[in-house]
């Protein structure tokens, strides 16, 4: 919802933004309706793809990495729902998120948790709040304990105060980047804890830099639940 509502404010300079919530037949629906610039029909499929930005001239004024709606779609689908858009150029857009709703008994909730022999204590270094929400949701769905850091300096501070089984490290962060933090953990703290890079840059040179800094794996953003679970299986096998 953060991304959808944020986009409504970003692209609506005049008029109104309406937020609606409805529950009908065990389907929980959120709708964000705006009177903004709208989206051309030929671009609708693009807006949910990573790094896609439809209107370059407008996005230069409100730049982002282009992951917002892609991550929102992943989060909604993780909950068994869907996100749709009804839009027209010059008249605005309505984004609708529909999620199945059913009141569960406590025993049913516990039964759906994915159990391992023990949970992992995972430090997630990520400066983007939306990415934090997505990764935290994935990890908690897999029954792991999550600690969040906003930059590399926080990683080092937390690492010296707590014990972690794994570090998921974004590469591009303020204050201290992920490569520098990984090198510090290896060279100064002398730790062999698994460090998995989180990056949208899939070029071989970037991957080589991650491994040179002491990272064990490179995970590509936007991260998928299945890919994350497969990567975590390697931690259990250490």
Image (cartoon, grey):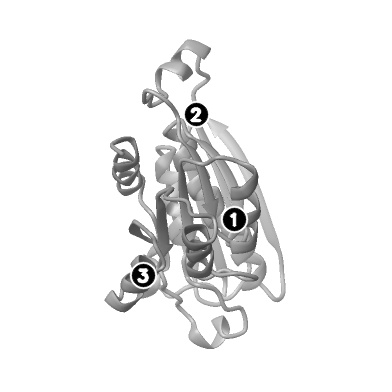
Left or right of 95: which side holds 217? left
Q: Tell me the residue at 55%/49% (across/down).
A: 133
Residue 234 is marked as none
Label 1 crowd bin: few (<14), some (14–19), many (20+), radius 10 Å:
many
Foreground residue among 102 and 90: 102
Query: For the residues carrying marks 2 and 3, which lies nearer the camera in this image?
Result: 3
Q: Secondary structure at mark 1?
A: helix
Residues packed near mark 2 inside 10 Å, few (<14), some (14 to 19) or many (20 plus): some
Quadrant of the image occupied by residue 91: bottom right
Q: Secondary structure at mark 2?
A: loop
What residue is shown at x 58% (from left), y 61% (from top)?
A: 128
Judging by the rendered image, the residue that carries numbered circle 3 is: 212
Q: Which mark is residue 155?
A: 1
C-alpha distance separating marks 2 and 3: 46 Å
Contact (Cβ within 8 Å) of mark 1 with mark 3: no
On-image quarter of the C terminus: top left
Q: Nearer the viewer, residue 212 or 134?
A: 212
Q: Position of residue 56 (x, y in %)?
A: 49, 85
Left or right: residue 236 compared with residue 15: left
């Amino acid at each position: 919802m953060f991304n959808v509502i944020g986009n409504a404010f970003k692209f609506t300079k005049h008029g109104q933004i309406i937020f609606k919530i409805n529950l009908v037949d065990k389907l929980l629906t959120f709708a964000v309706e705006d009177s903004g610039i709208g989206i051309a029909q030929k671009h609708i499929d693009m807006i949910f793809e990573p790094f896609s930005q439809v209107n370059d001239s407008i996005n230069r004024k409100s730049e982002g990495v282009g992951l917002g709606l892609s991550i929102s779609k992943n989060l909604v689908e993780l909950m068994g729902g869907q996100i749709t858009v009804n839009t027209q150029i010059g008249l605005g857009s309505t984004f609708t998120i529909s999620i199945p709703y059913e009141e569960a008994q406590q025993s049913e909730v516990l039964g759906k948790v994915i159990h391992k022999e023990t949970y992992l204590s995972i430090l997630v270094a990520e400066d983007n709040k939306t990415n934090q929400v997505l990764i935290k949701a994935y990890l908690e769905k897999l029954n792991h304990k999550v600690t969040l850091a906003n930059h590399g300096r926080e990683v080092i501070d937390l690492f010296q105060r707590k014990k972690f089984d794994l570090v998921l490290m974004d590469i591009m962060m303020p204050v201290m980047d992920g490569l520098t933090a990984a090198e510090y953990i290896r060279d100064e703290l002398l730790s062999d804890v698994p460090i998995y890079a989180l990056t949208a840059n899939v070029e071989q040179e970037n991957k080589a830099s991650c491994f040179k800094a002491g990272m064990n794996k490179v995970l590509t953003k936007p991260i998928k639940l299945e890919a994350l679970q497969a990567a975590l299986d390697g931690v259990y096998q250490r």
